[in-house]
Each structure stands twice: as C-alpha cells, then as structure tokens.
C-alpha cells in the first residue's frame, strides 16, 4: 500500500488521459481513465461506491440516509474512536455506538494521482483522495464528550483492481488518548449462500451473538447461514481474508491490512435486517457481507505528539 503524497501526475505522459474528479453536494467522485470509480460522502468520509470492471463492489442499503441525519448504512463507514457500544468508565463512554467519525462532516483535502514507478501505462494510474477531521470540526456535543486534540487523515486510493483505505491518527494535544478503529466495509455480493470466508481457521473470535463468548474458528471456508457477528482477533494483517464463491472457489474479494489485526465478520440475517429501519429491502441481507478490518479487541494508546497509521487494501476479482 502506498500512501505517500506523490506529486500530482509528475512523470506521466501528458498525452495519457488522467483521473477525473467531481465535487457535488458534499460528494466527491473520482474515476480512472480505465473506468474504475469511487465515491465518498463528506459525511463520515464514507465511501459509498466503488466500481470496478463495470460492477458495483460495495453494498449500500436502499434505505440508507444520505442527508447527514444518520450514519450511512453501507459502503465503508469509518469507526473511531470506539467500536460498538462504548464501555462504562472509559473516556469514550458518552459517545454513540462506533464513535463519531461516521457521523461527522469531514473536509476534502485534495486529490493526487500517480502511476507506478517505471511504468508508462494507463493501467498503472492511481488516484488518491484525502479527507481530514480534527477536534475543532466536531459538533459541540462530541467535543465535550471526547475532549482530545486529534487529527485524522483518511486516504482513499483507487487503482485498477483495488480500493485502499488508510487512516492516520495524530495526537495533537498534551494528553494521551486511547482509540479503536475499524473500516466497516459492506461488500456487495450476489448471494450469501454462495459465499465463503477464508483465512480465519484456527483464529480466536468473540461471538457477539453468543454474549461475546470466545471460540476458535474450525472452518477453513466459513459459510454464513445465520446471524453472524464475530470479532476475529490477532490475525496477521498481511495474510489476506478471502471472500470466495463456493461454486468455483475463486476469490470475489481479497482483503489485506496494515496495522489492523482484528477482522469483524457481520451479517444481520433475517430478523435483524428487518429490525433496522435504514436497512432495505428486507431481503438485502443476502446481498451483503461485512468484512471489517480494524483494531478493536484492545485500545491503541497514542501519546501526545505521536501518530498511528493503519489501512486495508481490497482486491476485487476482475
Ligand atoms: O447498526 P450499526 O451501529 O451500524 O452497527 C452494525 C454492526 O456493526 C458491527 O459489525 C458490529 O459487530 C455489529 O454488532 C453491529 O450490529
């Protein structure tokens, strides 16, 4: 994953078509000359569309609120600084479930594009969009409930066959703070019964559908046949989690991570899907699986003046 701020398009032949950008109604869209595109809402810096090979790769609920009144149900909501309901007696205790990043208005910091070093082909072009959120941009309520001086830079990079999302967290204040982070990715799938999740065998997970009890995964290719809400812990981020098709065992998605050693696998299934007002249609649980790269099973402590960085790269089968 390359998250450096490369100079815009230097070294790219002037005659080659370049990535395009549009900004409208707080939605940023970028596309590559080879057809791939990405869309990001400033509300939550939520990625709401990733098209590759002419297909939408992310699931967004038909009933998702896109007006900033509620976190967006689908795409890639960003969870920070707490995952799930905040614990009692913790600095995050008064925050909403999954923190404030997904329900704050971010700023667009700009676009940069590059081609792979030593290559001179359109196929190697990438486009990176950067978004920022800091303490002063939060609502008064969030500023009061989580009073730390922080800076987030979220980078969304589109390449020919991957989408990369990376977060930098900076402590810009004088006190240490603790955080959790997670990229709550809703993958678009044709049929949940055809999907298997690989790369989890022998890993310990907390099953949130069974009072958070601890288990060890026995399946090399996990089918989703009921409500599933599991936090797999201490995975090697470099080993991909593959979402494969049971029909041909080919990966539909392959997800590698950096500094994100937990992975949540979530599907609400029938009853929970019906119970979520912003989830629709009811049957849509068949068309999504959340595979969420994060650091959530403990807390990252960030000392004053320090920075932390983590991210994921999702490769889609083309
Ligand atoms: O409804 P939300 O707040 O968006 O949370 C949606 C889901 O997020 C994660 O996957 C959690 O593990 C689930 O327990 C939760 O239900």
Image (cartoon, rainbow, N blue to C red):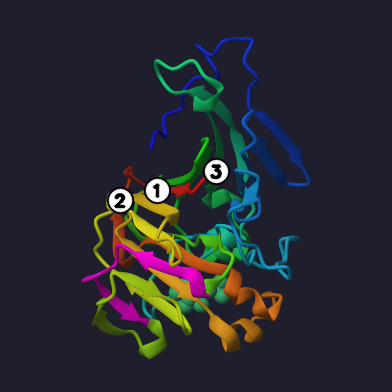
Quarter of the image for residue 46 reads: bottom right
- Name the residue: 42% across, 70% down: 265
Q: CA distance from mark 3 to mark 2?
A: 20 Å
Task: Assign a secondary structure to mark 1.
Answer: strand
Q: Is residue 65 left or right of residue 153?
A: right
Task: Residue at the far right: name it.
Answer: 25
**Residue in the foreground of this view, choosing between 116 and 104:** 116
Q: Is residue 234 left or right of residue 141?
A: left
Residue 158: percent from left, percent from top = 54, 38
In the rendered image, is residue 84 in sight? no
* Among the two numbered marks 3 and 2 on one chain, the one whose residue lies closer to the N terminus: 3
Specify the quadrant that holds the N terminus.
top left
Quarter of the image for residue 232 reads: bottom left
Can you identify the residue that label 1 sits on?
311
Region of the chain picked out in magenta, as a range: 193-207
Q: Which mark identifies residue 132?
A: 3
Q: CA distance from mark 1 to mark 3?
A: 15 Å
**Residue in the foreground of this view, choosing between 252 and 78:** 252
Say if disc 3 is inside 8 Å of ligand 1: no
Viewer-nearest of labels 3 and 2? 2
- Name the residue: 73% across, 46% down: 26
Where 133 sits versus 288, above or below?
A: above
Where 92 sits versus 271, above or below?
A: above
- Residue 169 colored in magenta in the image: no
- Name the residue: 61% across, 63% down: 74
Task: Assign a secondary structure to mark 3.
Answer: strand
């Amino acid at each position: 994953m390359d998250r450096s701020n490369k100079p815009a398009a230097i070294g790219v032949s002037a005659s080659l078509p370049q990535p395009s950008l549009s900004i409208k109604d707080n939605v940023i869209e970028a596309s590559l000359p080879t057809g791939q595109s990405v869309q990001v809402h400033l509300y939550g810096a939520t990625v709401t569309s990733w098209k590759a090979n002419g297909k939408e790769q992310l699931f967004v609920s038909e009933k998702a609120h896109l007006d900033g009144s509620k976190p967006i149900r689908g795409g890639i909501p960003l969870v920070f600084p707490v995952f799930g309901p905040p614990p009692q007696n913790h600095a995050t205790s008064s925050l909403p479930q999954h923190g404030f990043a997904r329900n704050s208005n971010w700023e667009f910091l700009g676009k940069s594009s590059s081609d792979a070093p030593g290559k001179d082909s359109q196929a190697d072009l990438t486009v990176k969009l950067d978004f920022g959120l800091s303490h002063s941009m939060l609502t008064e309520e969030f500023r009061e409930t989580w009073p730390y001086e922080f800076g987030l830079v979220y980078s969304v990079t589109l390449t020919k066959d991957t989408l990369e999302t990376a977060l930098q967290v900076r402590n810009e204040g004088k006190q240490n703070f603790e955080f959790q982070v997670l990229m709550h990715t809703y993958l678009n799938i044709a049929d949940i019964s055809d999907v298997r999740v690989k790369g989890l065998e022998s890993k310990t997970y907390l099953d949130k559908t069974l009072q958070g009890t601890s288990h060890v995964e026995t399946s090399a290719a996990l089918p989703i046949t009921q409500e599933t809400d599991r936090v797999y812990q201490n995975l090697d981020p470099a080993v991909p989690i593959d979402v494969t098709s049971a029909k041909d065992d080919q990966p539909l998605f392959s997800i590698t991570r950096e500094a994100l050693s937990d992975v949540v696998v979530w599907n609400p299934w029938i009853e929970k899907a019906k119970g979520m007002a912003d989830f629709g249609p009811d049957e849509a649980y068949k068309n999504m699986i959340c595979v969420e790269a994060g650091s959530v099973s403990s807390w990252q402590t960030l000392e004053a003046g320090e920075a932390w960085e983590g991210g994921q790269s999702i490769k889609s089968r083309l």
